[in-house]
Structures are given as C-alpha cells and as structure tokens.
Amino acid sequence: MRYWLVKHDKESIKSRPGSIWREIEGCSRVPPNYRQVKIGDQFILYAYKTSEHMDSEPCQEIYGFYEVTREFEEEDLEEGRHWTIKGNPLPEHKQGWVPIQDLTQFFEKKKFNQQAVIELTRVEFERFLRRHEESLP
C-alpha cells in the first residue's frame, strides 16, 4: 500500500469529494503519479488557497482521508473529459476542514510541492491523520 497527499483547490474538493481529478482539455499528458495510484492505496485531500480567496479563508486545509476504490481512467462529465481516480472515506476517520499552517512539518524530507499528487511515507500519512483527528470536535 502507498500513501498520497492530493492537492486541489477547496471548490474542487467540495464539488467532487473523494476524487483525484484533472481536466484533460489543455493538458498534454497524464499528470505525474496518477498512474502509480492503485486500489487499496490511501490518500489525503488537501486544499490550497487560490488567489481569489487570499483574505477570506485559511491558507491550507486538510479535508479527509480516503482509500482508492477505482484507479486512473478517463471519464466524461458534464463539464468535459477528466482523468479521475476515486476513493471512499476511511470509515474510522471523520471528514472535516482542518487548517494547516506549514505542510513541511509533516514531511520526513523535502517534497516536490508543485505536483498535485505527492507520495508520502506511512509515518508522514499518520502525522497528518493525528493532526486532523486532534483538531476535529
């Protein structure tokens, strides 16, 4: 099993919770790591702030923890074609927005933060999980 941190803007997470996705139009190739995510892997949905929300919301937030139930595939949606990976919430963990000030505190070593899907170690995944559970009511 592998662990992933998935970055989307908050509106994308709200519109398609439990999904890792990207529009195909305007993208010349499959995004990095999409093909490596497999059924049974676990991922964290993490929202970053877009420029239009700079003063109104926390800068970064964790939403929830998921297990992959459907691997990468192309999908036709009302909005167009997308590359999509689907997951179900981990049943033993609550979903909810938890602000995070500095992602680097969870990493054992420097990560390439420009990618939307970043591989984590089990220890890093569990650090995020503990912080999330401690912060929810």
Image (tube, grey):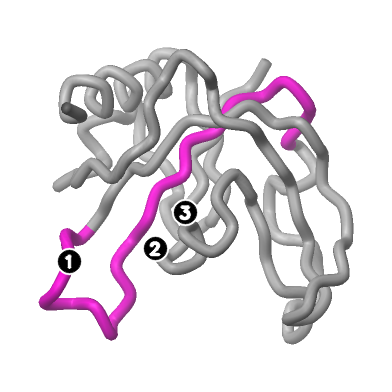
Task: Give the amino acid type for the residue marked by disc 2 in the picture.
Answer: Lys
The residue that mark 1 highlights is 57
Task: Give the amino acid type for the residue marked by disc 3 in the picture.
Answer: Lys
The span picked out in magenta is 37-59
Mark in the foreground, 3 or 1: 1
Look at 88% across and 61% down and name the residue there: 74
For residue 44: magenta? Answer: yes
- x and y percentages locating residue 2 in the rendered image: 63, 22
Task: Give the amino acid type for the residue marked by disc 1 in the picture.
Answer: Glu
Figure quadrant of the C terminus: top left
Going from N to C along the chain, the mark reached first, 3 or 1, is 3
Does dot 3 land on a helix, a strand or a loop? strand
- x and y percentages locating residue 23 in the rendered image: 71, 73
Residue farthest left in this picture: 55
When asked about the image quadrant of residue 26, the answer is bottom right
The residue that mark 3 highlights is 7
- x and y percentages locating residue 128 in the rendered image: 32, 27
